[in-house]
Image: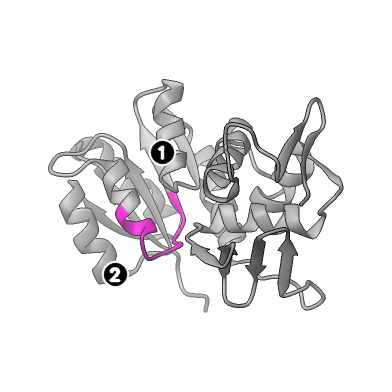
């Protein structure tokens, strides 16, 4: 029998947290809960969940800070959940490493679809025929070691940024369409906001470009997508 997916639900509203816990249990998930940011970190370290549903607004420590703490050492999928719908909240959540962002109220079916998508992408491994070592200019990516260096200096990339950079480097010199990048990194059944791609490209540029405001490694091909070249 397959091991049930362990979910850490972090929300400071007892009614919402309890309702979501019961709904996900009925779907076969193993649920742990936390009511504030500090408790969330304690629970994460104790149970090592397969995915985290993390509210943005939390007492004692914000969901953004909790996500940042998780990303410092783990690639566990994180979906930020919030009653807020302002674009800035989604951008901040993605910038600190969240895999997706969903606003309340939402349909349970949509949430579960997003959970399965990010978990599937997180667990996927490169196929045997993919090159382990990729190089474009001063950027070197090692798939096996999950390492990236720029001018010989290591840089830290969360899973989605690493996968996105690998896709761009694999097709160095060619235009990769936005749809192709989303399909390859987030999955063909991804139903989130396409702005997610733009946020991740911006974060990549900040880490690998000599001047992120005037990118030369990852260039935008208007109306098509992106191209990476030395």
The reply to whether residue 2 is in sight is yes
Q: Give the magenta part as a residue range.
A: 69-78
Q: Is residue 75 shown in magenta? A: yes
Q: Residue at x 59, y 36 (%)?
A: 192
Q: Secondary structure at mark 1?
A: helix
The answer for how far apart the CA atoms under marks 1 and 2 are is: 23 Å
Q: How many marks?
A: 2
- 36 or 1: nearer the eye? 36
Q: Is residue 111 shown in magenta? A: no
Q: Decide which of tag 1 and tag 2 comes sooner along the chain.
A: 2
Q: Residue at x 51, y 57 (%)?
A: 157
Local packing at callout 1 (Cα closer than 10 Å; few below 14, some 14-19, many 20+) is many
Mark carried by residue 93: 1
Q: Which residue is mark 2?
A: 47
Residue 1: x and y in percent read: 52, 79
Q: Residue at x 54, y 59 (%)?
A: 159
Residue 62: x and y in percent read: 23, 40
The reply to whether residue 103 is in sight is no
In the picture, residue 162 is in which quadrant? bottom right
């Amino acid at each position: 029998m397959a091991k049930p997916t362990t979910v850490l639900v972090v929300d400071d509203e007892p009614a919402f947290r309890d309702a979501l816990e019961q709904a996900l249990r009925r779907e076969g998930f193993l649920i742990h809960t936390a009511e504030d940011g500090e408790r969330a970190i304690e629970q994460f370290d104790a149970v090592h969940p397969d995915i985290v549903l993390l509210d943005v607004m939390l007492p004692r420590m914000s969901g953004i800070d909790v996500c940042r703490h998780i990303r410092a050492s783990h690639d566990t999928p994180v979906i930020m959940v919030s009653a807020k719908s302002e674009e800035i909240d989604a951008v901040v959540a993605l910038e600190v490493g969240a895999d997706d962002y969903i606003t309340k109220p939402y349909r349970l079916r949509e949430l579960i679809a997003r959970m399965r998508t990010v978990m599937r992408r997180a667990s996927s491994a490169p196929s045997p025929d993919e090159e382990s070592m990729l190089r474009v200019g001063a950027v070197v990516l090692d798939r096996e070691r999950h390492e990236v260096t720029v001018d010989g200096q290591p840089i830290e990339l969360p899973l989605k940024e690493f996968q996105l950079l690998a896709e761009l480097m694999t097709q160095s010199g060619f235009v990769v369409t936005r749809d192709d990048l989303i399909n390859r990194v987030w999955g063909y059944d991804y139903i989130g906001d396409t702005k997610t791609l733009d946020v991740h490209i911006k974060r990549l540029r900040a880490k690998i470009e000599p001047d992120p405001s005037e990118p030369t490694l990852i260039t935008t091909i208007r109306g098509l997508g992106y191209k990476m070249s030395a």
